Amino acid sequence: MAAGLRQLGVSAGDRIALLLGNKIEFVLAWFGAARLGAVTVPLGIRQQRPEIAYALKDCSARVLIHEAELADRVPSPTEAPALERRIAVGLRGPDTFEALVGGASGDPPVPVPVGEEDTAAILYTSGTTGRPKGAMLTNLGIVHSAMVFESCMELTADDRSVAAVPLSHVTGLIANIAALARCAGALVILPAFKAGEFLAVAEHERMSHTVIVPAMYNLCLLEHEFEARDLSAWRIGGYGGAPMPTATIERLAEKLPRLKLMNAYGATETTSPAVLMPPRYTATHSDSVGKAVPCATLAVMDEQGRELPRGEVGEIWIHGPAVVRGYWNNLEATEREIVAGFWRSGDLGSIDAEGFVRVLDRKKDMINRAGYKVYSVEVETVLAAHPGVVECAVVGTPCAILGERVHAFVVARNEALTPEILRAFCAERLSDYKTPESVTLLTDPLPRNANGKVLKRLLRQELIG
């Protein structure tokens, strides 16, 4: 893989974008690029052409390795002027993955020396301004987080993990690929999560470890075959992105007494885990996400950036070797969100005297749909671009299975505008999980406070009834 990229002229620091789903080519491409000191830019296969074009242009990617069936989403040369080569996976012939690897000649490239703080990967995360930001993950951050998972989850070469979350997200990249490479375990890659298939693979492969979101555990429990499956090898169940219902924890403990559930709290900006719950406390501290991982420091700050005493509620700031060094080509966002090495999470929470971290609310208007983070501002920006929209607001509506679903309140210019038209408009411009699943059309203006800010609290109450 590295030899093939070298023949394309790829060298240290070049950006290699991956528009790939869960498959072995994703892992090979990442490791091959790393051997050359190149920077990998994973893109989600649910992203649409405008989102992909923005990321490719922003990072000036030279090479894009993409799914053949996603060729229609590959931006044109004018949309991504720095892009020199487009490599398709799943086809034969020139400009394909098979030709790239099969046509490589010469000795394998000697690994290029890299610095600990050099950028190893750029992961685009939705921004509150509506434009994604490219978080720069470092070599040190990736290795450190892999070591954290290995140590805290007691992973060994005997472990067999199933990757059921997207490898292009920080959890898949770090908790699955990097962590299992670190401990020399086996990684079984699922193309996509389907509860029945996941359980069948977990049984057949003797899965001992996985990291998924609570919604996936809930879907597994709803499968009629759950009770019949032999999951006795499963010993570590990581989860994050949303609280785990107490009923789910109890049901899993009843069926799988050997399974240790570990909550994880982190973000792209912390290279995955900043907090992990020791499994012995999962059942007794369900209101907490756990304790700071080794070498991480968490502080709770007030609006003036002063640390608050233990137990008081404020914004959670995170410091440590896994915190990204900033956002690609975005000094303003870097200076705003990373202060003295601390990343400002935007989450409101507290830390008690024993070090247990509690996340009480999302300071940013973020919607959590089955572990996928959806920033309302990004969706609102797209909706507001429709000529029939006067104003809009996007909120999360509670869902017992997925946690939250995306709901939009829209003040329409005329009666010709329908929810179906708006959903189709968004579907062409946003990932499917960001597209509003339901829309309320209004004739009156959105409720606002004295400062003109939309009162989303009232809108959420209206949904709940």
Image (cartoon, rainbow, N blue to C red):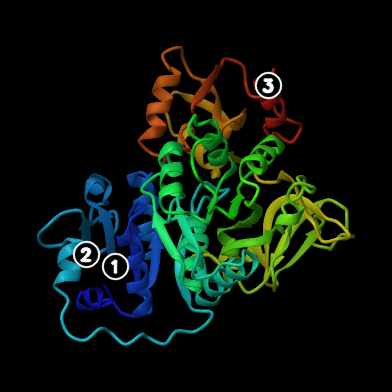
Q: Position of residue 189 (x, y in %)?
A: 39, 54
Q: Position of residue 234 (x, y in %)?
A: 55, 52
Is 352 left or right of 28, judged from the image as shown? right
Location of mark 1 (residue): 62
Q: Position of residue 410 (x, y in %)?
A: 54, 24
Give the spatial CA distance, label 1 vs label 2: 7 Å
Closer to the observer: label 2 or label 3? 3
Residue 23 versus residue 33 in the image, above or below: above
Mark nearer the N terminus (3 vs 1): 1
Residue 345 versus residue 220 in the image, above or below: below
Within-10-Å neighbours for mark 2: few <14, some 14–19, many 20+ = some
Location of mark 3 (residue): 464
Mark nearer the N terminus (1 vs 2): 1
Q: Residue at x 76, y 50 (%)?
A: 288
In which image quadrant can residue 332 be found?
A: bottom right
Q: Mark 2 falls on what kind of element?
A: strand
Q: Mark 1 falls on what kind of element?
A: loop
Q: Residue at x 38, y 30 (%)?
A: 425
Is 465 left or right of 314, judged from the image as shown? left
Query: Is any atom of residue 455 visible in this view?
Result: no
Location of mark 2 (residue): 85
Q: Mark 3 falls on what kind of element?
A: helix
Q: Residue at x 44, y 34 (%)?
A: 385
Of residue 95 and residue 29, the one placed in the foreground of this image is 29
Within-10-Å neighbours for mark 3: few <14, some 14–19, many 20+ = few
Q: Which mark is residue 260?
A: none
- Amino acid type shown at disc 2: Arg
- Check whether the beta carbons of the residues at disc 1 and disc 2 lie within 8 A of each other: yes
Q: Position of residue 187 (x, y in %)?
A: 42, 61
Within-10-Å neighbours for mark 1: few <14, some 14–19, many 20+ = many
In which image quadrant can residue 83 be found?
A: bottom left
